[in-house]
Image (tube, rainbow, N blue to C red):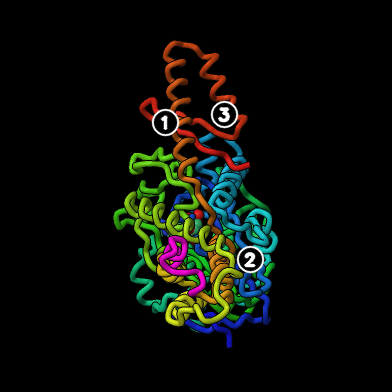
Amino acid sequence: MSALKIYNTLSREKEHFEPITPDHVGMYVCGPTVYSDVHLGNCRTFISFDIIYRYLLFLGHKVRYVRNITDAGHLEGDRDEGDDKFTKKARLEQVEPMEIVQRYTVGFHKVMELFNNLPPTIEPTATGHIMEQIKMAQEIIANGYAYVVDGTVYFDVEKYNKEKPYGILTNRKLEDLLEGTRELGGQDEKKGRLDFALWIKAGPEHLMQWPSPWGMGFPGWHIECSAMSEKYLGKQFDIHGGGMDLAATHHTNEIAQSQACYHVSPVKYWMHTNMLTVNGVRMSKSAGNGFLPEELFSGSHPLLEKAYAPVNVRFFMLQTHYRSTLDFSNEALQAAEKGLKRLWDAYETLTGFVPEQSSTGHDIDPELEAKVLKLVNEFDEHMNDDFNTAKVLASMFELVPVINSIKDKTIALTALSADTLTWMQSRFKNYLEDVFGLKAVNEADNKKLQGVMQLLIDIRKGAKEKKDFATSDKIRNQLSELGIALKDEKGGEMSWSIESP
Ligand code: AMP
Ligand code: ZN
């Protein structure tokens, strides 16, 4: 039996992880809706799944990791109400919807790279899989679980629920779910209040639309993930992930669609990450508390006391288990900065120890040896316990004083066996670099860079005040050539950010 246990939202239990095909893992994670910049909350979810992906690779699995790009179909309300997010933004900016998609897809990739997230192995887009979505909707209609009203295709939730429990993922009865939704009005064309659209008729105002058996339209948001996961991972696959907020509607509908189409439960392990909050309030665009990663890296948001390097933010996230809420604060981030520095310094010290110089025999301190082995072996135990990165880091921090004492020579290097030392060195490397995807931040260089940038910004400001635009443009252009972007903020302030190559 595999040692890895995963908390499955569906069973509400930690289960031993057994891939459907031994050693091969299929994982699907709902990707961003690219009509705006991703905020730090979105990043938390993607970083959590990056760690999960990296750990599965570390365990020796061959992983197909599919993370989609939602570039059509996501209306403002998760239950198909409101405007199309892409059309609205494109209208506002007077550009093509695909220009919106392109801009925010590129931005998303940049942010993922800055956080050192590995790219997924497949990144399919909704617009690239219109045929697959139409076909799935047709099959669901043929199986009797969907109906067409004036060019829109609805999934019949109440009919489905007669055979399969619709609210199975979040353990809720249909009656309870119905209570939370509004009554249908006279002009509603849906049969049931919980019915959701598989395909939506497009009016002339819709900028993105495709021909279908039901006329011009565009796919619903939920069908996209069902169609693309089936295409690349099959009718049944191992892991499906996303933020907790997706479980009640989006993922619940995905299960219903796949069951109605293929008569099987699509996913073996449903995984949901908890929310990033600010002062206890979930970070979201609508709450106005959504820091953009660039604001964080340049310190340009009013709630931020300073700039924070991406690796420190990543480390801050790993210090909390992915199923707990994580509250953002300047103090917590500054504590994480100090923590990572202390840990990384110890790691570099540890790497410098030469195992041949440690003991082969009588100098070994059995108590110390046992303590070190226990803590190092705990790394795997904690990760196998539903990816508990927080506990791995706690075990590492318990080893820091031992490493520092060896460095200070208050403990002799010979108190540890060469085998234990080598084991500790390789485990630190495996975890810090490969699984956690961390790296050193050179704080001294970072501070110098902040200082130099502030100096340039001040000079540029002075030049502009004197109407010396040649100098101010020169500074902006040459920085841009170096990959550093300057941005005008409200109140005449300037911020800067390093663009990834
Ligand atoms: P979206 O682009 O809105 O579809 O969201 C992309 C991913 O980010 C989804 O998996 C969401 O569940 C997740 N997400 C949204 N807000 C937060 C938050 N505050 N903390 C963690 N994850 C979030
Ligand atoms: Zn999805």
Q: Nearer the viewer, mark 2 or mark 3?
A: 3
Residue found farthest to the bottom: 1
Quadrant of the rendering where the C terminus is positioned:
top right
In contact (CB < 8 Å): disc 3 and disc 1: no
Q: Could you say which disc has been placed on residue 65 in the image?
A: 2
Name which residue type carries label 2. Tyr
Q: Nearer the viewer, mark 3 or mark 1?
A: 3
Q: Residues within 10 Å of mark 1 (few under 14, many from 20)?
A: few
What residue sits right under mark 1 in the picture?
489
In contact (CB < 8 Å): disc 2 and disc 1: no
Residue drawn 55% across and 14% down?
470
Q: Main secondary structure of the magenta part?
A: helix
Residue drawn 34% across and 55% down?
332
The residues tagged by marks 2 and 1 sit, at their Cα atoms, a distance apart of 38 Å
Mark toward the start of the polypeptide (2 vs 1): 2
Give the camera-side residue of 287 and 450.
450
Residue found farthest to the left: 279
The stretch in magenta equals: 402-415
**How far from the left and from the top, in percent, is residue 314?**
48, 56
Give the camera-side residue of 162 and 4.
4
**How far from the left and from the top, in percent, is residue 402?**
43, 68
Residue drawn 55% across and 71% down?
358
The residues tagged by marks 3 and 1 sit, at their Cα atoms, a distance apart of 17 Å
The total of numbered circles placed on residues is: 3
Q: Is residue 235 left or right of residue 439?
A: right
